[in-house]
Amino acid sequence: MVSLFDKLNAKKDGRDGSVSKELLSHSVAHTKNRLPKSGRRTSERSLAASVKDGSCSNSKSNKRNSSASVSGEEDKSCLISLNCLCCGVPLRFPASITKFRCSACQVTVIVKEPEINSNLESNTHISCTLEGLQMVVRRCHDDLQRLKKTGILDKERKGLIFQPVITYLLDRFHDVSILNRSFLVHDGGKNIKMLNYEVLQRFYSILSNLPTRKPYYSMLCCCNDLLKRITINKGENLQILQYRWLLIILNIPTIRTCLIRDRKSKNVFETQQIRAVSYELAKRCIGYLSNLSTKTSQQLIQSLRRTPTDNFSYQVEILNLYINFQFSRLLSNELSNRTAKNNVKPEDEMRSRLRRHHTTGHEFLSTRPISAQSNDKQGSGFTHPVNNKMKFKFFQYEEDWHIHSAAKLMFIYYVANTRRNGRGALSIQSFYNITLDFIDYKQDFDHWRGVAQKTKMNQLIEEWGNSTTKKWFSFCKYPFILSLGIKISIMEYEIRRIMEHEAEQAFLISLDKGKSVDVYFKIKVRRDVISHDSLRCIKEHQGDLLKSLRIEFVNEPGIDAGGLRKEWFFLLTKSLFNPMNGLFIYIKESSRSWFAIDPPNFDKSKGKNSQLELYYLFGVVMGLAIFNSTILDLQFPKALYKKLCSEPLSFEDYSELFPETSRNLIKMLNYTEDNFEDVFSLTFETTYRNNNWILNDSKSSKEYVTVELCENGRNVPITQSNKHEFVMKWVEFYLEKSIEPQYNKFVSGFKRVFAECNSIKLFNSEELERLVCGDEEQTKFDFKSLRSVTKYVGGFSDDSRAVCWFWEIIESWDYPLQKKLLQFVTASDRIPATGISTIPFKISLLGSHDSDDLPLAHTCFNEICLWNYSSKKKLELKLLWAINESEGYGFR
């Protein structure tokens, strides 16, 4: 199917400074594509491009690029292909065309020849300023006061008084170049111009506090016209090269409020018309910013790096609200489909689900809240989809350009956030969108991996859509938007599938070869030599690492249903971090562990070394812990997890590990006197203490070792000019070069486990640390949240006497005792990354009578078993004995 390009008469743009009464309907109405009538004059320089995207009703044409229907006189081979500057839909049009329109987002693009700079000199001094607006508003207020004194003030005259404000706004907001020169300030003495967000907010605040809405509404409509008709130069590769004007519009206050369904708001500036136009501004600003060229996107990232934290966070919030708004539209359509489900044929329902409605958001803004709709249908058999565990299917958003553009722009903000070192970087939680917890993450993940199953529905969609191209959008491409909870669900889904596949393969091999093949990865160890036995089992079963893990302790009766596995991880990590092994060093100043630079009996000149095998074992253990949903008690700095996620290291990472040394290095960098070399007298060398020199068998080992940081470093003095290079090499040595063999062996073990697991790529360093170590409470655990999800077995209930005593006792304990209790019941003193309320905690009754026996724990099921003790004091005494004297699966 070939899209049609209608040749229309070129019209000159006119602007008389007044606000048209039909401007609102023009800004939000759908523009219908019509074939040109016979005999109508057409212009060779005007073209309307009929383009299809995911929101159009005919899904068949979604699969192909838009193209132009060119007459035989035109050269069909001279076609230009580009993506729409707003929605990103592919377009094709003849090179001779200077105006075209995308029917997906209704944006008209005007291509013109670059203008000579001399013609623009008369307008270069014009800009929009806070002082200019204040001056005009002050005069209007003076006129208003004079009219009030005369007593002839009415609504019409009141509107005319503020006409100068409207004129001022229209003269400034109708031109991209004028907006780009407005609200600028130099950044910290550097020759870099930045948006002054404080002045911009005061500018909008003045307009919001005027006694009439007309100036504010006129500004919105003017911005809407500017966004709907974008002009680009031919010499700019048909790209938008300026972005500041888009940020100015994006920070208009009503853009945020229009995305929030607050129908009780009494703000006079939140009328239906203002909300509708504000939504138009939001979707097009986000669209343009997400489709900037690579060079302009890098400039935007540099600008966002220097944006104040509050303003940066505000813009991230707008993007999340915009995504929520788009999914609320999908939910509204789903509700409409469900209400008519009993009266619709299956094939009609399928077509309605596949249909893409092209809307501007104006219709949805005027609908009733979802809660009101659900309340109206109570008692009529209506079930709210959220309560029914409804999931947004992949096909509902895979072609929605609104969601695509918001996700792409969010990626730009995320990259900028990672580069905001020392400028108030946001945590990863600020980018989470909880609405995405309701997507069908299995479909999304399978599509991201490219192994989506060809179900009948998928085949039907491809047949109806005549699809020959592959869709590449998936939220897994933008994992920073997904919450940690849904990422863990995705990982559990993939791991479960891998384990099932491994078990199935083992069963088939056993049938084929006629011998027993274990479907589990079994490790049998002795407690006193747990490191040696574990390393031996892992080496002997390299092909079984992806199977479900089962642990057996020699001469112990325990059966592994999860508890033995936790015990094995706990004891093995404790053994590996034993100072006598010398694998890791403990740094007192930061309370963190790090790789030992010179482990015992380690020769860097040898290609293979027995000591490195223990680092490989530790890498496998960390991978298996994640693979088997077990939390480890590790005290590594963030630098380790950044290295695992291939994120760049910084001086802040070194400061976390060596805070005292970093403070001294900062003092050196801040010293600017001329006698720098005389004061410090340093060269490009570093000396470290070999913490394992006593353990080394070699008599030639020394307690202190000096290393050159560069070639001939002992003869290179540190000066004012090279001191920054010295600090960079210093940090690089301690975080990377000095531990390279040890770390590489550790990574090889970690990646050996996750060789076939793609979901690990969804986590960044901050999330990976929480995934491995859980959340460590610094003061006390939130046992009230744990109590709210606790299940009771054997006759206990939440108001039972012994149960009430139990919660009162543990809440009164200090933090170390609470950790011991958690270790006793769950085999880990850490809480999961998703919070303590996600622990499936149980309390069961051992007997209805009093007893002198101690409480028991089933760590496999996070269950503690209590007797019906006669007093609170006795219960506390028995608990203290149990948590302090227990070891393994018995008592000392």
Image (cartoon, rainbow, N blue to C red):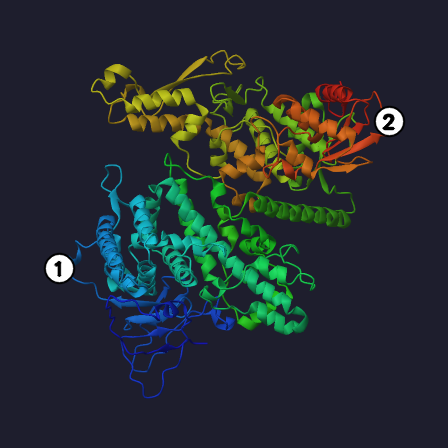
Seen from the viewer's position, the closer of residues 313 and 52 is 313
Q: Amino acid at mark 2?
A: His
Q: For residue 706, which quarter of the picture?
A: top left
Residue 778: x percent and y percent? 56, 27
Amino acid on which the number 1 mark rests in the picture:
Ser
Picture quadrant of residue 735: top left
Does residue 756 appear in the picture of this structure?
A: no
Compare residues 824 and 870 and report the one nearer the observer.
870
Quadrant holding the C terminus: top right
Residue marked by disc 2: 849
Task: Identify which residue is drawn at 35% across, 78% down.
Answer: 6
Question: Badge 1: how crowded within 10 Å, few (<14), some, or many (20+)?
Answer: few
- Which residue is found at the position 32% from the left and 88% from the top? 39
Which sits in the foreground, 707 or 242?
242
Give the residue number, with chain letter if any, for mark 1. Answer: 118
The disc placed on residue 457 is: none
Tell how many labels. 2
Where's residue 420, x and y in %? Answer: 38, 39
Vertical position of residue 883 compared to residue 493: above or below: above
Q: Position of residue 472 (x, y in %)?
A: 49, 58
Q: Nearer the viewer, mark 1 or mark 2?
A: 2
- Asked if the residue under mark 2 is in contact with the one under mark 1, i.e. CB atoms within 8 Å, the reply is no
Asked if 420 appears above or below 677 in the picture, the reply is below
Query: Looking at this rendering, what residue extends furthest in the bottom direction?
Result: 39
Relative placement, left or right, of 80 versus 596 is left
